[in-house]
Image (cartoon, helix red, strand yellow):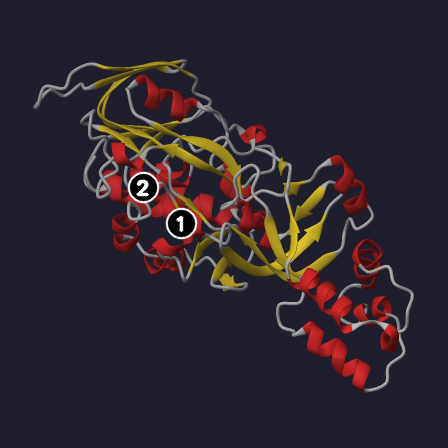
């Protein structure tokens, strides 16, 4: 069975590529080992799919080459995908920080992509296990450049697109297949790690965090000089919540993270003001006015267990405590891992690919798009925008 384009992976990037290639008159088939389309889309955004971000730009992406994503992102923008959503009459809303969600269900986005694939003439072969992929010819003009052996038969193609995603969330089918294929063809891989993931802490600290499970705090968190302002959520083993997940993208094993628990407040000045007003309360009780009481009490038990009323607390001791509140430094033992991570950081080295087309520089006709590439966005719709943009870019030339 010969096709102009075989796309391995029928997720967001793969389907976008198929739509674009099909519209150009190419004969396209998408192969996927799953029996269901768009599993990762369906679970995203609490089932409502945070399908893009109005503020998406290269600044929100992490890569060994931070310039690589510029070309694709500039040519297929959030507004371009929003237009597709509107053409399908899908109601949506902005939740916060430019994040766009479906009003009803992530299934709307899967249906959009599937319908556009069908309109463009692209075919699907689901529940398809791939046993071998080989290069046949690199001679210009030769139709068959690649062969793909599968449980559904033998396919040949002129262009082969790898849109297999990363290692995140194995229970919905994530696998290292795309990286293994890149390595088979001699492409370099930037080491992969789970990202947009909660932090875990050492056993001694876990005992402390265990008491705080379920508490959310609005704060700013800094990892490797990149700061995010959102909520953190204490879990039984560490930290989760949007701010922690964002920070994990910039974190490497052994790095500390720093938390400003009161980012909008000069807390030393605030305590001194209370002192001047004649307050005789304990520091612990005053802190409960600023932070969730269970957290405030626990934090004081750890770092300021004094039972002295405020007038008897020295300014030096108060300043030291406030510095801890503004720069609470912790060193995670790791992240939760691929089972919960939203995405995979690292992947096919961008040095191996054309930034304009996503085609391999070494192997003509071989393309890598989406999460399998070493381009990872922040939480908030950025990774879907990379999927759409990279799939669109490859779809113009396959």
Q: Is residue 317 visible?
A: yes
The picture quadrant where one finds residue 8 is top left
Could you tell whether 51 is left or right of 161 in the image?
Answer: right
Image coordinates of residue 12 in percent, x first then y, are 41, 41
Image coordinates of residue 386 in percent, x first then y, are 37, 47
The picture quadrant where one finds residue 63 is top left
Could you tell whether 90 is left or right of 79 in the image?
Answer: right
For discs 1 and 2, the disc positioned in front in the rendered view: 1
Q: Look at mark 2 in the image and give the residue it sits on.
A: 391
Crowding at label 1, few (<14), some or many (≥20) Cα neighbours within 10 Å?
many
Q: How many marks?
A: 2
Secondary structure under the numbered disc 2 in the rendered image: helix
Q: Earlier in the sequence, mark 1 or mark 2?
A: 1
* Quadrant the C terminus occupies: top left
Task: Residue at 74% x, 64% y: name it.
Answer: 321
Q: Look at mark 1 in the image and give the residue it sits on.
A: 61
| 117 versus 136 height, above or below | below
Image coordinates of residue 233 in percent, x first then y, are 69, 52
| Residue 315 - label | none
Mark 1 vs mark 2, CA separation in Å: 17 Å
Task: Residue at 54% x, 41% y: name it.
Answer: 342
Crowding at label 2, few (<14), some or many (≥20) Cα neighbours within 10 Å?
many
| 382 versus 139 height, above or below | below
Secondary structure under the numbered disc 1 in the rendered image: strand
Could you tell whether 316 is left or right of 186 in the image?
Answer: right
Along the viewing direction, whichever of 240 and 276 lies nearer the viewer? 276
């Amino acid at each position: 069975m010969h096709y102009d384009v075989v796309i391995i992976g029928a997720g967001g990037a793969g389907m976008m590529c198929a739509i674009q290639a099909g519209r150009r008159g190419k004969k396209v088939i998408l192969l996927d080992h799953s029996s269901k389309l768009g599993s990762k889309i369906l679970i995203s955004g609490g089932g409502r799919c945070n399908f893009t971000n109005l503020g998406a730009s290269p600044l929100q992406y992490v890569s060994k080459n931070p310039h690589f994503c510029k070309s694709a992102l500039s040519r297929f923008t959030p507004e371009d995908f929003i237009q597709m959503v509107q053409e399908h009459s899908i109601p949506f809303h902005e939740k916060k920080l430019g994040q766009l969600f479906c009003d009803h269900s992530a299934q709307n986005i899967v249906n959009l992509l599937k319908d556009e694939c069908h309109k463009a003439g692209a075919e699907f072969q689901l529940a398809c296990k791939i046993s071998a992929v080989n290069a046949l010819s690199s001679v210009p003009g030769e139709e068959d450049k690649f062969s793909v052996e599968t449980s559904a038969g033998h396919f040949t193609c002129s262009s082969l697109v790898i849109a297999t995603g990363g290692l995140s969330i194995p229970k919905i089918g994530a696998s290292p297949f795309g990286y293994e294929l890149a390595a088979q063809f001699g492409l370099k891989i930037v080491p992969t790690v789970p990202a947009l993931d909660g932090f875990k802490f050492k056993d001694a600290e876990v005992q402390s965090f265990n008491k705080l499970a379920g508490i959310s705090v609005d704060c700013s968190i800094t990892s490797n000089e990149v700061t995010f302002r959102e909520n953190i959520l204490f879990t039984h083993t560490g930290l989760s919540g949007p701010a922690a997940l964002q920070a994990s993208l910039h974190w490497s094993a052994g790095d500390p993270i720093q938390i400003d628990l009161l980012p909008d407040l000069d807390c030393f000045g605030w305590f001194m003001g209370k002192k001047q007003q004649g307050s005789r309360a304990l520091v612990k009780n005053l802190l409960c006015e600023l932070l969730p009481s269970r957290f405030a009490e626990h934090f004081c038990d750890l770092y300021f267990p004094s039972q002295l009323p405020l007038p008897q607390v020295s300014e030096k001791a108060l300043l030291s405590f406030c510095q801890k509140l503004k720069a609470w430094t912790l060193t995670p033992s790791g992240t939760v891992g691929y089972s919960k991570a939203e995405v995979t950081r690292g992947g096919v080295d961008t040095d191996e690919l054309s930034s304009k087309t996503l085609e391999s520089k070494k192997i003509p006709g071989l393309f890598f798009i989406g999460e399998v590439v070493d381009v990872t966005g922040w939480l908030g719709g950025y990774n879907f925008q990379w999927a759409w943009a990279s799939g669109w870019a490859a779809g113009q030339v396959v």
